[in-house]
Image: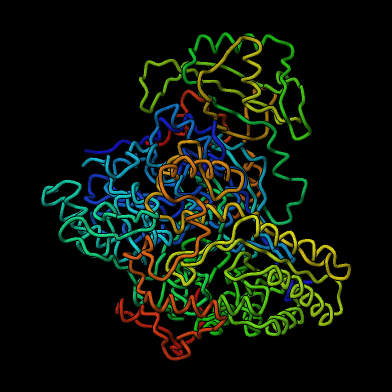
């Protein structure tokens, strides 16, 4: 048995929204967790540890985006042994992380918050932006119409439980295609480039943007010539009527507002339209 | 003229390769300096995969030292995996640096650090991808100076055709000196072109330029002589030794990768050099004399290093860390400082010495005592006298007994097979030793879960050691002895199941032997292997013995020499060795005498604690042993 006193208990829990941008979209979930643990130490944040021979910092992650996928809305939760001002943690943790892993928002959980408010339960759907270089907007729009018109679109993919065939249509709450209005980078600006914007429910097995692309290929032969650039723009509670995602940290913020912290959210509860989401176009953010 | 980043062309291709994060850079503490503001630009390479190369201390130290200088810029590049190599060839993407993704061919110096000879084929891949001609003779003024360093550079003859220059020894001061020579040459308008700057470097006596030397051979294939072929080039090239490591406290800001790498810790060299005199150990011979870093500098470096990185492990590196004159105070001081901070301390390997258990206990205050590693290297007392590893079996048993009594449950023992004068019996004695270790552990603890792992590597004779004259044992013999040992351990009913055996087959050691003691003619073999697809020879899944043997047969067909000639042959005292003109400071007669002493099973003491026994390094190099104690202690940190 380990010697010494029991580890200090968690007395404050912080929920953190972070982004992975630019070339750091190629980090895996494991890469990010190592980077976060080191940043927490560098920033001197009093993280709590588990007991045992190999104590682990109490940091948990909710549904991380895949390697190669950029994101504006990833979430983690940290247990602290001393209370800290969330606004300060946001700044210090952000400074300690490598550029491209950026802390967007930090909210303290109100005392006595139980499991019922688990963050994962609030992450009901994701909004994705998919850039398809070399695809004409018209072709993408036609494929989207065919996809939406279909009752079900079955795709096959290797999941953790082996090769599975499943419907991806039902998980899609919204899907649209349009011409990329904000081309940057070195390519000629008149090269075709379509953008897909989609809101997809978190289901089992998970329906990922590349599953939707597989579906588009099946229903309309849409075949992008180069790998798509995928960015998660938001996660949250899905309003089935409006298709709008609500910021999953808002409920915590509302309860904790008495504390008067100034850790403002990056872009509130409204679903940002991709057409004017230049500020979050992580994929081409490398200048 | 500014040099464009290739990243925009690379990025769309990254999803198609394994672990793309290794190619994107952006590590914490990495730097991108203004290309146009620099006059001398270095591309530094560790010729292995990123996960192995990134933690390399040598590259990190030079990267930081060069980037600290105004007008100097250094970026890093690593060997790309075959899948990436294919993607780069298909898309005409050159070898690039991970810092700013600039083509390696655009730099002034392409410095490659060779810890092992098995990286030679990866050098050729990088040169080819960079668009730099493979052979020095084919390069023109616009190409970088290809510079080799690292331990393997103490005999760079096998890659003499591929590099423009090589440096021996510590890199800190010579890298800056080379930078100054290049800066002056450029400021003056690059007089004499490529040869002009190489000649300036060669004239310093501290940079070896292989093509300024001619090698003549005897009819039987041995070397007749190696001589400079133009005025101003010295007959011998000297190694570099940094004295006073406290003046060079690097790395200050170690790189923290996003990708997973082989070492995830902050490493600090606590001393350089080793005078234990183990005859097989090239590192111990070529890094003399011992130069300690003081306890206070070590403490300050660990404090700063942890702050800069967020690492949770500190490695105290050296060739024999427990030999630091104040290691106990270092261990206790660091242990006290970081108590309760989830920071662990580690030593790379430990001598067989009961004192080291006290040390190990200090390093494991949290109570986790899983495994300890010792390196007796030779199985029999006789063998250990031959290699000058002065430890008796009774010492070992006493040491492991103490370890088991202190709560350790597993002991790992390192050995070598194929040592000079070795017999089957010498190797089989390893089994006897391992059994005694288990028996001692069971008696000391009364427990049955005591384990011992025996790990064996094939011995490769290395340049600048007393064994440089020794014939290497053929791989069939090595494999047969390892099988005998395995059978001996397996057949033991009482202890066999408590003893694990780890070994590799002997074939790769033969190729390492060829590359270690080869001369310039071996370059043709390396090139043939590379052209046949040879890559990553240090990785068993990529290494092909057949490829090497058949390339050696073809490439050396017209020569009076072959693979066996390079590896299995005993050399006599007067033979000119390919590296004789490269000066590690060791007196040749002393080395020969030490080789004779090895055969006679005569041991030699450590000059730190006994009078000098004239290895020659200090008078030749103008150096001296630098050891403590300083009498200082590490005070608690005010803010942790």
Give the answer, above or below, for where B14 lies relative to B168: above
Report x, y in % for residue B515: 46, 54
Q: Residue at x 35, y 20 (%)?
A: A188
**In the rendered image, which quarter is residue A214 located in?**
top right
- Say if B155 sits above or below B50 in the image: below
Q: Position of residue B629 (x, y in %)?
A: 45, 88
Q: Is residue B365 left or right of residue B532?
A: right
Residue A139 visible in image = yes
Please tell me which residue lies in front, B635 or B158: B158
Left or right: where does residue A147 sit relative to residue B69?
A: right
Out of A184 and B318, give the one closest to the viewer.
B318
Quarter of image, res B448: bottom right
Q: Which residue reaches farthest right? A: B493
Tell me what residue is drawn at x 41 percent, y 36 percent.
A286
- Vertical arrangement, residue B371 with respect to residue A224, above or below: below
Measured from the top left, where is residue B566 in percent x and y?
47, 56
Closer to the camera, B118 or B547? Answer: B547
**Residue A264 in sight:** no
């Amino acid at each position: 048995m380990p010697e010494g006193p029991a580890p200090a208990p968690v007395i404050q829990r912080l929920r953190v929204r972070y982004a992975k941008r630019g070339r750091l979209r190629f980090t895996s979930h494991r890469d990010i967790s190592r980077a976060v643990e080191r940043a927490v130490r560098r920033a001197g944040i009093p993280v709590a540890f588990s007991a045992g021979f190999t104590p682990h910092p109490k940091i948990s992650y909710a549904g991380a985006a895949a390697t190669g996928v950029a994101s504006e809305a990833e979430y983690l939760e940290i247990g602290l042994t001393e209370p800290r001002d969330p606004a300060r943690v946001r700044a210090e943790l952000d400074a300690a992380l490598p550029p491209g892993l950026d802390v967007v928002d930090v909210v303290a959980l109100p005392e006595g918050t139980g499991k019922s408010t688990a963050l994962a339960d609030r992450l009901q759907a994701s909004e994705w932006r998919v850039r398809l270089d070399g695809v004409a907007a018209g072709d993408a729009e036609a494929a989207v119409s065919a996809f939406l018109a279909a009752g079900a679109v079955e795709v096959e993919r290797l999941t953790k439980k082996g090769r599975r065939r499943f419907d991806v249509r039902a998980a899609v709450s919204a899907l649209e295609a349009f011409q990329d209005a904000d081309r940057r980078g070195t390519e000629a600006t008149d090269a075709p480039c379509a953008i897909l914007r989609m809101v997809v429910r978190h289901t089992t097995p998970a329906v990922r943007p590349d599953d939707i692309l597989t579906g588009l290929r099946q229903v309309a032969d849409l075949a992008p010539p180069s790998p798509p650039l995928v960015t998660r723009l938001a996660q949250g509670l899905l309003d089935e009527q409006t298709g709008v995602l609500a910021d999953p940290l808002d409920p915590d913020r509302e309860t904790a507002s008495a504390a008067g912290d100034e850790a403002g959210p990056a872009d509130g509860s409204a679903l940002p339209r991709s057409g004017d989401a230049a500020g979050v176009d992580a994929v081409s953010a490398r200048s | 003229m500014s040099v464009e980043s290739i990243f925009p062309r690379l990025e769309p291709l990254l999803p198609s390769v394994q672990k793309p994060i290794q190619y994107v850079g952006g590590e914490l503490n990495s730097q991108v300096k203004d290309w146009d503001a620099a006059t001398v630009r270095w591309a530094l390479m560790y010729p292995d995969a990123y996960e192995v190369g990134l933690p390399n201390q040598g590259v990190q130290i030079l990267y930081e030292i060069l980037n600290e200088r105004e007008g100097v810029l250094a970026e890093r590049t690593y060997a790309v995996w075959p899948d990436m190599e294919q993607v780069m060839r298909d898309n005409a993407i050159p070898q690039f640096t991970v810092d700013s993704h600039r083509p390696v061919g655009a730099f002034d110096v392409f410095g490659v650090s060779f810890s092992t000879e098995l990286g030679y084929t990866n050098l050729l891949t990088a040169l080819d991808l960079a668009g730099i001609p493979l052979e020095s003779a084919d390069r023109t003024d616009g190409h970088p100076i290809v510079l080799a360093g690292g331990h393997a550079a103490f005999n760079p003859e096998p890659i003499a055709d591929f590099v423009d220059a090589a440096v021996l020894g510590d890199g800190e001061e010579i890298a800056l000196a080379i930078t100054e020579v290049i800066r002056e040459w450029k400021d003056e308008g690059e007089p004499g072109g490529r040869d002009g700057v190489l000649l300036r470097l060669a004239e310093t006596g501290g940079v070896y330029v292989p093509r300024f030397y001619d090698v003549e051979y005897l009819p039987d294939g041995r070397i007749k002589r190696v001589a400079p072929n133009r005025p101003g080039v010295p007959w011998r090239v000297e190694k570099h030794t940094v004295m006073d490591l406290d003046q060079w406290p690097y790395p200050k800001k170690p790189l923290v990768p996003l990708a997973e790498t082989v070492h995830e810790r902050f490493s600090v060299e606590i001393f350089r050099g080793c005078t234990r005199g183990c005859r097989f150990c090239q590192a111990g011979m070529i890094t003399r004399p011992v130069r300690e870093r003081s306890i206070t500098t070590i403490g300050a470096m660990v404090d700063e290093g942890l702050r800069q990185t967020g690492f949770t492990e500190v490695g105290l590196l050296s060739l024999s860390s427990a030999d630091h004159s104040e290691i106990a105070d270092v261990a206790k001081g660091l242990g006290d400082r970081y108590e309760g901070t989830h920071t662990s301390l580690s030593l790379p390997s430990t001598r067989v010495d009961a004192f080291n258990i006290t040390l190990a206990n200090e390093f494991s205050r949290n109570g986790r005592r899983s495994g300890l590693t010792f390196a007796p290297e030779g199985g029999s007392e006789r063998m250990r006298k031959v290699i000058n590893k002065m430890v008796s079996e009774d010492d070992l048993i006493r040491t492991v007994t103490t370890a088991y009594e202190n709560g350790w449950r597993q002991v790992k023992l390192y050995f070598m097979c194929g040592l000079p004068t070795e017999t089957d019996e010498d190797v089989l004695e390893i089994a006897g030793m391992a059994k005694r270790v288990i028996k001692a552990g069971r008696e000391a603890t009364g427990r049955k879960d005591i384990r011992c792992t025996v790990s064996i590597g094939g011995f490769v004779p290395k340049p600048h050691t007393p064994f440089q004259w020794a014939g290497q044992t053929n791989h069939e013999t090595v494999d047969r002895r390892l099988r005998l040992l395995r059978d001996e351990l397996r057949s033991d009913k009482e202890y066999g199941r408590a003893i694990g055996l780890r070994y590799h087959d002997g074939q790769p050691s033969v190729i390492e032997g060829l590359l270690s003691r080869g001369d310039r003619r071996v370059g043709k073999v390396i090139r043939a292997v590379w052209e046949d697809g040879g890559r990553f020879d240090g990785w068993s899944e990529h290494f092909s013995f057949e490829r090497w043997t058949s390339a050696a047969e073809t490439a050396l067909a017209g020569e009076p020499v072959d693979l066996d000639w390079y590896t299995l042959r005993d050399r006599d005292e007067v033979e000119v060795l390919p590296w004789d003109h490269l000066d590690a400071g060791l007196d040749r007669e002393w080395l020969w005498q030490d080789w004779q002493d090895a055969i006679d099973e005569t041991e030699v003491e450590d000059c730190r604690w006994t009078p000098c026994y004239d290895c020659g390094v200090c008078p030749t190099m103008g150096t001296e042993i630098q050891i403590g104690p300083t009498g200082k202690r590490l005070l608690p940190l005010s803010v942790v």
